[in-house]
């Protein structure tokens, strides 16, 4: 995880709470998808157009597909670094990839991806305008 | 917990999942409030007017106050019995009490209460009609 | 989803709670992984060897990889049918597939898969005995 | 919430995620107890003795009783300020109070309290040493 961040990516830190653990003493597997959600929210915030702004502009981004590969468990009170990387964006779909690592050691814990559709507030497919695509790209 | 159920009460069973546990090997404390939510939903379903029906009729019941007293921890895979008891209902407020026990042994694990306001879909206070009060009472 | 269940599969029902929804008014995407966890727990229970039994016998099944494809959203109070299907089991790994549908209509909402390693209570890889493999197969 | 923080208190910020909301478009009520947990963890971290340190020293602090009073709802993407205040600590019990407000406006959203017992890793009551009490007080 060391070195420079890739383009179109955003890092942020999150602390593992007790809620996030399970009785194996590690972070419960579904919670990595929650970290991924926060990761893409922070990606957008860093480009000056938050997920909340996007909703006000009439779009939501429901998840069509999600994957996560688990390498090493995270534990209570670990400070995680979540990196969200905008893989592709078209006027129809968006794909994010994620790398979740332990901040202190840089150890990579999990990788993931999510694929989303642009949808209007009526939950029907809605082609994104070029401006919306540009905002996600941070252009 | 033995004996007959009190009037205006409803029991239902829920199985503890891995998600519900934490690294102490017991159910995480906030999740009892989730069980309590399911308990009042089942109370209403048993009276033929579900929470979803109530929302369609223009009311929601946000929580004003919640309490839980923890006696003995619940563990993974325990089958719980959640008893929701309608304590009081007026045209303005509703109070539920809860008893959560281990089905197999009858042991009481936790007790709780929630106080709710009748609110319209605009999130403003809205007096319940006598019919709404009667439905909650199962009359 | 109609017709007979495939071999090595198990169905169970779960009711969507308020906790499971998000502000889009649908089930939050990470919660499908929770339903999948309950699905494989019920698969094992139906074969007379619960996940808790397995832990007592010295094994846990951490998730190596998880995927979920979302077709149609689930809503509050929907009764879901979760089908867990044991895809493969070796002495090293287990793969489950899942189909999540709306009980009332039979509509398929999501499909998923999880791959697991056999691990001992020390969290190190541990080859399953043939008896353990047979138990998962229900033989 | 403006002005100086009370003694024996600690503030920290947390951002509301999609997971934390429900279909009413507000933070689900049980999640305030999660924020309260993070609040007391940050209280301890600021005194140089984290909850994880405490566990290594042989204590856990299970919740005996929890309460929350909800004044105004929190929404998606709100930046919350969670203030944890150590109300009392004896060799047997600890009581924390909490104030949860919206960082941007200072508006108070909820207040709460939790009462905890000192327990050993065997989950039996264990009197805290004077050193443990002093650490919680930050002395």
Image (cartoon, coloured by chain):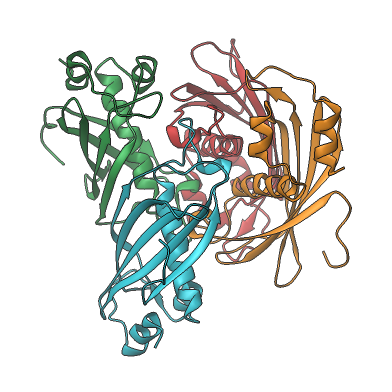
Chain colours: A orange, B green, C red, D cyan
Q: Is residue A96 left or right of residue C57?
A: right
Give the x, y percent position of residue A64: 72, 29
Nearer-the-camera pick, B50 or D137: D137
Do we see residue C5 in this rendering? yes
Nearer-the-camera pick, B135 or B80: B135
Give the x, y percent position of residue A55: 65, 31
Q: Which residue is rendered at x = 43% and y = 54% of the image?
A: D101
Farthest front residue in view: D3
Q: Check the image and report above or below for A13 versus C34.
A: below
Do we see residue B76 in this rendering? no
Q: Which residue is rendered at x = 44% and y = 71% of the image?
A: D10
Q: Is residue A126 left or right of residue D68?
A: right
Q: Which residue is rendered at x = 41% and y = 25% of the image?
A: B122
Give the x, y percent position of residue C8: 61, 28
Q: Is residue D82 left or right of residue C89?
A: left
Residue A93 image-quadrant placement: top right
Q: How many marks?
A: 0
Quadrant location, the C terminus of chain C: top right
Nearer-the-camera pick, A1 or C13: A1
Q: Check the image and report above or below for C108 versus D107.
A: above
Give the x, y percent position of residue C77: 43, 23
Quadrant location, the N terminus of chain C: top right
Q: Check the image and report above or below for A78 versus A39.
A: below
Q: Check the image and report above or below for A17 versus C51.
A: below
Q: Which residue is rendered at x = 50% and y = 77% of the image?
A: D46
Residue C33 image-quadrant placement: top right
């Amino acid at each position: 995880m060391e070195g420079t961040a890739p383009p179109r990516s955003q890092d942020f830190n999150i602390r593992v709470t007790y809620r996030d653990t399970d009785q194996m003493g590690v972070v419960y597997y579904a919670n990595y998808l929650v970290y991924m959600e926060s990761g893409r929210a922070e990606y957008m915030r860093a480009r000056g157009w938050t997920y909340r702004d996007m909703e006000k502009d009439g779009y939501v981004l429901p998840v069509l597909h999600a994957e996560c590969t688990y390498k090493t468990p995270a534990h209570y009170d670990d400070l995680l670094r979540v990196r969200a990387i905008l893989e592709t964006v078209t006027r129809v779909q968006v794909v994010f990839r994620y790398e979740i690592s332990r901040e202190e050691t840089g150890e990579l814990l999990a990788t993931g991806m999510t694929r989303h559709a642009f949808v209007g507030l009526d939950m029907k497919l809605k082609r994104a305008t070029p401006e919306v695509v540009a905002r996600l790209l941070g252009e």
